Image (cartoon, rainbow, N blue to C red):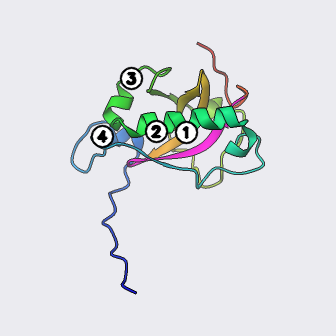
Amino acid sequence: MGKFKQRNQEPQTPFKSDRQGGEGSTQHLTPFFSFEKMQRGTGYSIACCPQEEQAALATKLFELSQITWATIQGTHRHGAGCEIIPQSRLHVSLPRSVTDDVTILAFRYNGKKAMLGYRDGRILHILLLDHNFTVYDHGS
């Protein structure tokens, strides 16, 4: 068997610094999605959602995978866009691997139900599914 050729990895750029679209920016790229950091047993994982919500999540991820990060950032938060949720507004604990300086993003996936995660370059690490509106105060 032959060896697999390793792909060059993109630089890991946090959400805030990648907004500018400068050298090394991933703004012009479409997002990748990861569930690696989502934890079972929290009440906010994909395993806690009924099939109809899981299907809505898959549909949303497909929709987002077809547009660039720049487009996502320029779209309304209740559409294909997102909003920043300060960690201080969260009513649940995040995985230990998520430090205080990480910017948490909320995307709507089933009506106004939110998936929360953070961006690392072009990857969105999905952490929580707020399927019952208890992860943070949704106000306005």
Whole-number angstrom distance, CA of label 3 to CA of label 4: 14 Å
Q: Which residue is mark 2?
A: 62
CA separation, marks 2 and 3?
16 Å
- Ranked by sequence position, the earlier of labels 3 and 4 is 4
Q: Which residue is mark 1?
A: 58
* SS type, badge 4: loop
Residue underneath mark 3: 75
Q: Nearer the viewer, mark 2 or mark 3?
A: 2
From the top left corner, tell me how far across and down residue 84 is, in percent: 50, 30
Q: Please identify the quarter of the rendering in which residue 134 is found.
A: top right
Contact (CB < 8 A) between labels 1 and 4? no
Q: Which mark is residue 119?
A: none
For marks 4 and 2 on the same chain, the one whose residue lies earlier in the sequence: 4
Q: For residue 115, say whether it is visible.
A: no
| Callout 1–callout 2 Cβ contact below 8 Å | yes
Q: Name the residue that disc number 4 marks.
A: 27
Q: Secondary structure at mark 3?
A: loop
Q: Look at the image and say whether residue 125 sits in the magenta stretch.
A: yes
SS type, badge 2: helix
Q: Earlier in the sequence, mark 2 or mark 3?
A: 2
Q: Residue at x 25, y 39 (%)?
A: 21
